[in-house]
Image: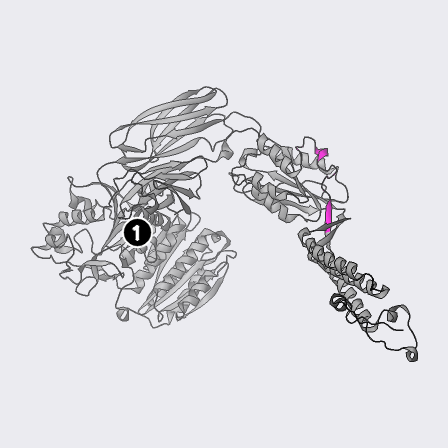
Amino acid sequence: MDLRIDMPLALLLLLPLLMYFGWTYWRERQRLKKGHIVVLGIRIVAICCLVFALAGPYILLPVKEEQVLFLVDRSASMNGTDDEMANFIAESLQSKKDEQLAGIYSFSLTLQTEAILSDSLKEVPKFTAIKATDQTNIEQSLQLASGIVDPKKATRLVLLTDGNETKGDALEFSSKFKGSNISVDVVPFNKPVAKDVSLKSFVTPQVAYVGEQQQLVTEINATAAERGELLLYENDKLIHREAVELAEGSNIFTYKHSATAEGLVKYEALVQVEQDAIFENNKLTSVTMVQSEPHLLIVNGYDTASPIAAALGKQSIAYDVVNANSLPNELSSYLQYNAIIFDNVPGHLVGEAKMSVIEQAVKNFGVGFTMVGGENSFGLGGYFKTPIETLLPVEMEIKGKEQLPSLGLEIVLDRSGSMSGAKLELAKEAAARSVEMLRDEDTLGFIAFDDRPWEIIETGPLGNKEEAVDTILSVTPGGGTEIYGSLAKAYENLADLKLQRKHIILLTDGQSQPGNYEDLIAQGKENGITLSTVAIGQDADANLLEALSEMGSGRFYDVVDEQMIPSILSRETAMISRTYIEDTPFYPTIFNASGWNTLFANGVPKMNAYIGTTVKQGATVIAESEKEDPVLAEWQYGLGKTFAFTSDSTGKWTGDWARWQNWGTFWQTLISKMLPSYNDVAYDVRLESDGSFVITDPTNEAAFLDIVAVNEAGEELETQLETISASQVRAVVQAEPGLIFFRIADEEQAIYQAGLSVPYSAEYELRPVNDKLVEELTKQTGGSVLKEPSEVFREFTKKGAERQNIATWLLLAGMLLFFIDITIRRFGWSFLTRPKKKEQLVEEKPIQAEDTNVAQLLKGIKKRS
C-alpha cells in the first residue's frame, strides 16, 4: 500500500496556518488552560485534514491480476509468417499463470480481435481474414490496445512485427505510456527472404511536345540474377516489349519514344519474371504533359459515320470519333482531350461511373462539353439526375406539365438473393429516380419479388414522393425468383385504370418457372399496357426477357454493367411520361451573344425539331424556340464551359441548318468556345519523401492558387494545403497508390494540369527488421526484445495498483472535528470529561481575556465548575 498526493503544492497552505497558530500559542501560553489547548489542537487537526483533502491524497492498493495482449502484425510485409507467429504465441501461453489474462489481436492498418482478453485463453485460434494489408499502423494498434486493457492492472503489450511502419508514429505515441502500468515487448519477425524483382523508379519528362523523342527511364531492383521482360505502355497501349537480363541489385533501362498521344499522357512500366515474391511492386506509372494543338473527342451515337465530323471536315481541329461502348474509365484518357461532344448518345451505354469521371474532367480540368440532341439524348437518353445533367446548362425536366398525358407506371423489381449488393442498391436508386420524375397525380405501383410478389407500394396516385422513395430504398434482398406471378400482378393492377399511358418495367437477374406470358401480355395490350424488360447480368434469361418486351411493345435492355440501371429507368420513365420531342418547324430566335451574331448576319435557317428541356438559372440562352425552350444554351461549370444543342446533327431535326453554308462554321465556333484557357506559367509539382506534394509557383503567388487533386476514377481527393513560402504550397493528399492529377488555377481561372504517380506502398519492399524502432519502443516503455516464448509471461516490473481516494474521508474527519470544536465551545470541556447530575450543573461566566487575540481565539469556550 502506498500513499500519494496529486497536488502537493496545496500543502503549502499549512505553513501560514501553522505559523499563525504557533505564534498565538507562544504569545498566550501563560493564560491557556488544558481545555483551551485541547480545543486549539482539535482546530489545528481539522484544518490540516481540509488542506490535505485539497491536495488530492490517495492510496494505491495492489492488484494481483496481470494482462498480456498479443498484437500480431499481419500487413503485406509479414506475409508468410502467420504460422510462425501463432506457434510463438501458443508456446508462450503454456507459461501463463492463473491470475494472468491474455488476448490476441491482429493489425495492419486497423486492429481486429482474434481472441478477447480473458483468463481462460489456452490455445491460439485460426486467424481471421484481414483487409487493407498495404499499410502498417503500429501507433493505432497501440492506442486501441491501451483502450482495451484495464488501466489498474499491470499490462504487457507484446508486438509481433518487423517494425516497418508506414502510417503513424509509434515512438511518439509510446511516450504516453510513461508513468502508466503498460510496457511494450517486441518479438521481431521478418518475411522469409525470396526471389523478388521490383520497379524502384520510372521517370518520364514532365513536359514534352508531339513528335518529340522522350526518354523513359526504368530502374529495376533484383534480389538475385534473373531473366525477365520489361513492358511499357502509353495510355494503356503497349509501345515496347523487351527481354532483359537482370543482375543482382539495381538495373537501369532507357527507352526512347516519340510521343503520339496528347495532353496528360499516362505511361506505365511493368516487369515480369517467372519467380517473384511480391507482385505488387512490379508496376509503376508516370505522367507527361504532351503539348499540342487542341484535340476533340466526338462520341457518336449513330450507327453511321459521325455527322459532326463530316461537318467539320479534315482541315479543322484534330478529333477522335468513338462510340459509347468504347469510352474509357480512367480520367487520364479524357484529359488528353480539350473538349468532348456527346452526339445522340444513350445514357445507359455510358454508365454513371464514366459520367462521374467526365464531370470531374469538366469541373476541375476545364475540358469543354457539349450534348447534341436526338432520340437518345437529354431526357430521352436517360440523363435525368446524372452527373452529365449536373454539368449541362439545361435540366431534363420540361415545361407545360399540364399538357402531359395521364400515366400509370408499375415497377417490378427482383429482390432475390442473387440481387443482393450493388445490383439491388442501384436498382432501388434507379426506381427512386423514376419516382422523382413523375408528377404527384401520376399513378405508381412497386412490386418487389423473390419466390412470390410483395406489393411494396399499392398501385394508386403517387401523392407523397419522399415517402415513396424512402419505401423503395428500404427493400431488402429475399429468396428465390418467380417472375410470372409478379408480372401478372402488375398487369392486374393497371388493367382497369382509366389512363392514357400504362407501362410496366421489369428488372431481374435470374430465371423463372414457365408461364403463359403470351396470353398475359396480349390481354394487357388490349388494356393499353406496354412492357419493357431489363436483364441484369449473365445469369438472367435474356431470351425470355427480350421476347417479353417485343410482345409488350416495349424495349429490352441487356445490362452487363449494373451502373447502367439508373439511366435505363430514367430513359424509360421519360419516354412514357413526357412528350419530349417538339416537331413543329420554326425559326429559332438568336440572342445578342458574343461571337454568334456574325453567323446569322444573313438570316436564321428554319429548324424542324428539338428535345424539350428547361434552362438552368445562371445559364445563357443563345438560341430559343417559339415556345421559349432552349435550342442552344451555355454556362460555366467549374472551370469548364458546357453547351446544350437540343436539335440533332443529322439534318432530320435541324432541317435547313444542315444545308446552311455556315453549318461547318457553326460547329467550329461551338468547339472554339468550349476550349479551356490554359496557364502559361510552368508550375512545378513534386512528390516529397513524406508522401506530400510541393507545388512551386515561379510568380511567387502560391498562396492564391486554387488546387484540386483527383484520382484516376474521377474522385476528388481530400487535400490539405499549407503555404510554405510565397512561391511554395504543400499539399497533403489522402490517396491510394496510382495516378493523381492536379488542377492548378490562378485568380483568372487559367488552368495548369499536372499528373504524378503515387508509388506502391513501402509494405511491398523487402526490408529488414526495423531494429531502431524496436529498441527505442521497448526502452521508452520499460519492455524487452523477446527471443523465447517463455519470456512473455515473466515477472512484471510494473505492478498493478488500484487507486483509492481518501480526500472524502479527510473532509468527513475535518467536519467531525469542527463539530467537536463547536460542542466544546458551547458546553465546555467538563461536558466531555466529567458528566454530572442536572441539579449540580452551574453555569459559569465566560473567561474574560485581556488581549484581543486571545479573546478571539477563546471566544465561546465555556467551562463548568
Q: Quadrant of residue 797?
A: top right
- In this rendered view, identify the residue nearer to me: 340 or 840: 840
- The structure residue drawn at horizontal position 25% and vertical position 29%, both measured from the top left corner, is 212
Q: Range of the magenta residues?
A: 784-802
Q: Quadrant of residue 296?
A: top left
Q: Position of residue 300 (x, y in %)?
A: 25, 47
- Specify the amino acid type for callout 1: Gly
Q: Position of residue 317 (x, y in %)?
A: 19, 41
The answer to whether residue 128 of the structure is visible from this angle is no
- In this rendered view, identify the residue nearer to me: 776 or 233: 776
Against 459, residue 630 (above or below) is: above
Q: Quadrant of residue 632?
A: bottom left
Against 493, residue 674 (above or below) is: above
Residue indicated by mark 1:
638
Element under disc 1:
loop
- The structure residue drawn at horizontal position 40% and vertical position 60%, both measured from the top left corner, is 431
Q: Position of residue 452 (x, y in %)?
A: 50, 61
Confirm whether the magenta stretch covers residue 303.
no
Q: Residue furthest left?
A: 602
Q: Position of residue 77 (x, y in %)?
A: 54, 33
**What kind of secondary structure does the magenta stretch mostly adopt?**
loop
- The structure residue drawn at horizontal position 33% and vertical position 24%, both measured from the top left corner, is 255
241 left or right, relative to 764: left
